[in-house]
Amino acid sequence: MPARRLPFPLLPSNRRQWLAVGLIALIVAVHLALIDWANDSLALIRALDEEDDPVIVELHAPAGKAAVVPTPARPAKQVPERVAPMVPAIPAAPPASAPNPAPDSPATAETATAPAETPAAPSAATTQPQPQETEPVASTPSAPVVESTPLFERVSFPPSAELSYDALATQGSRRLSGSGTILWQASGTTYLIKGEASALLLNLLSYQSSGQIGGTGLMPEQYQEKRIGKSATTTHFVRERKTISFSASTQLHEIRGGEQDRGSVIWQLAGLARGDPDKLAAGLGFEAVIAGSKAADRWNVIVVGRESVTLAEGSVTGWHLSLAPVENNFDYQIDLWLSPDRDWYPVRINYSNRSGASLSLSLSRVGKK
């Protein structure tokens, strides 16, 4: 009995058919790999945008109360033993021979941007604190001592420029490359900051800060922020009412002087470091009030030290500063490197969150304005 012939062959009968089958298999494999890569990249993007509910660390918890356990993936916050404000909230009466400008009064470009000629000697309030400032409190043994004397007394901002960055998002073994830009404009008594970072043709983060330049540095008036998957938010600094309000929440924060937003704080630190570089020292800690999209919180700023930063054009030296919220650990932690070799521009900025995801920006080009 002759064998029955199948309507189609189970295997290709010639080389041309084998090539066609191989090509189809390769296309399917590439598509599957692209789908897997896209899913992995989108998971990383979602991790970058993760925003948990606030987790408040109780600083006055009674003995025996269960402690809040932080997520291991988030870098541990460093708390300084002593904390001084960046700039004075309420100016003290100046001596007759050397009047100080009020912190919330606009200044001319020469006053706001003049670099320090000689470092000021530390005041008695910093070198010889009063006893009530240094005596430990039993209920809060780890709380830093807050001093009233401002740490920085001069401000000198870098020249206006458009900075280009190479962006790298990471979480564990996931990696995603992109690009970013920051526009910094300081003109007379006003400033404008625009920043954005993108990957996979998607805008991961964009923000804008604008306001005035006063005797103590930047005085934000409006901060706008847009993150992927989130609605745009606006934060208003209403100085006539001395309040900070938020479009994404009903909270109000009282303006006392020196408050910054998440975009302006980087350039405020650059201006203070450039104006008073002799004040920088490894281990130095001070405090800043930073407004985000929903609230204004106290942040600890730690000067980690001078470090070598590798950029596309080579290595530069930068001062590493680490910023972390004092109480709310759900917000981003920010690390930045300010380089005296590059006019104190931020040569690297790193944002990290509780999920262990981070977005790093490394300077690739400076376009002077």
Image (cartoon, helix red, strand yellow):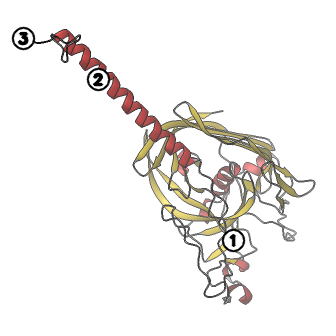
Please name the amino acid that badge 1 sits on.
Answer: Ala
Which residue is at the far right? 240
| Location of residue 269 by image quarter | bottom right
Distance CA(mark 1)–CA(mark 2):
65 Å
Residue at label 3? 1
Q: Nearer the viewer, mark 3 or mark 2?
A: 3
Could you say which disc has been placed on residue 84 in the image? Answer: 1
Q: Residue at x 30, y 19 (%)?
A: 24
Distance CA(mark 3)–CA(mark 2):
37 Å
Distance CA(mark 3)–CA(mark 1):
100 Å
| Location of residue 250 by image quarter | bottom right
Which element carries disc 3, helix, strand or loop? loop
Please name the amino acid that badge 2 sits on.
Answer: Ala
Tell me the crowding category of disc 2: few under 14, some 14 to 19, or many 20 or more residues within 10 angstroms, Cα based.
Answer: few
Q: Residue 315: image x %, image y %?
A: 42, 47
Residue at label 2? 25
